[in-house]
Amino acid sequence: MKDKNKIIKEDQARDGLYQVAYANGLTLSIGQSETHYSMKRFTVPLTVEVAVLDKDGEFVPLTEYDDVAQLTIAKFEMLTERMERLPADHDEAAQELWHWAEF
């Protein structure tokens, strides 16, 4: 069985923005505030804005037209599971996520 891409750091960068850094150098950025592509019903999140940053802090395009994506909670869960299964090699992992949100 392939090793998991381990989480090495979780951080609240600022109000409404969380970042999760993985061992392969990628960072998952999760935004949920009035300034993000996200929605809530009452206090329950319906969607979140996500971005993936490479080891140099550059965006990995999640769609053909944008570096960030608005995902339902179910699709967000799929992305987090995918992040944990990515290869240890940074470049291979970034390539696997290229335009991921379009599928």
Image (spheres, rainbow, N blue to C red):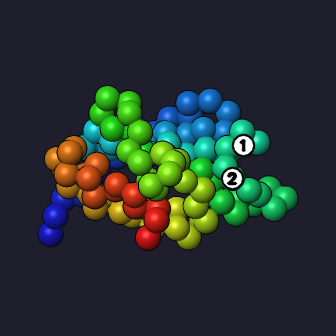
Residue count near mark 1 (Cα–Cα under 10 Å), binned few <14, some 14–19, many ≥20? some
* SS class, disc 1: loop
> Image check: 32 left or right of 71?
right
State which quarter of the image contains the C terminus: bottom left
* Residue 99 x, y percent position in the rendering: 40, 58
* SS class, disc 2: loop
* Residue 49 x, y percent position in the rendering: 59, 50
Q: Residue furthest right?
A: 42
The relative height of residue 18 versus residue 74 in the rendered view (above or below) is above
Which numbered disc covers residue 38? 2
Q: Residue at x 60, y 56 (%)?
A: 70
User: Do the residues under discs 1 and 2 have CB atoms within 8 angstroms?
Assistant: yes
Q: Residue at x 16, y 64 (%)?
A: 2
Q: Residue at x 46, y 62 (%)?
A: 101
State which quarter of the image contains the N terminus: bottom left
Give whichever of discs 1 and 2 has the lower sequence position.
Answer: 1
Residue count near mark 2 (Cα–Cα under 10 Å), binned few <14, some 14–19, many ≥20? many
Taking depth in this image into account, of 91 and 2 the one nearest to the observer is 91
* Residue 73 x, y percent position in the rendering: 60, 65
Residue 86 figure quarter = bottom left
The relative height of residue 100 versus residue 57 in the rendered view (above or below) is below
> Image check: 44 left or right of 56?
right
The relative height of residue 83 versus residue 11 in the rendered view (above or below) is below
> What type is the residue that disc 1 sits on?
Ser
Q: Which residue is mark 1?
A: 33
Q: Does residue 8 appear anywhere in the picture?
A: no
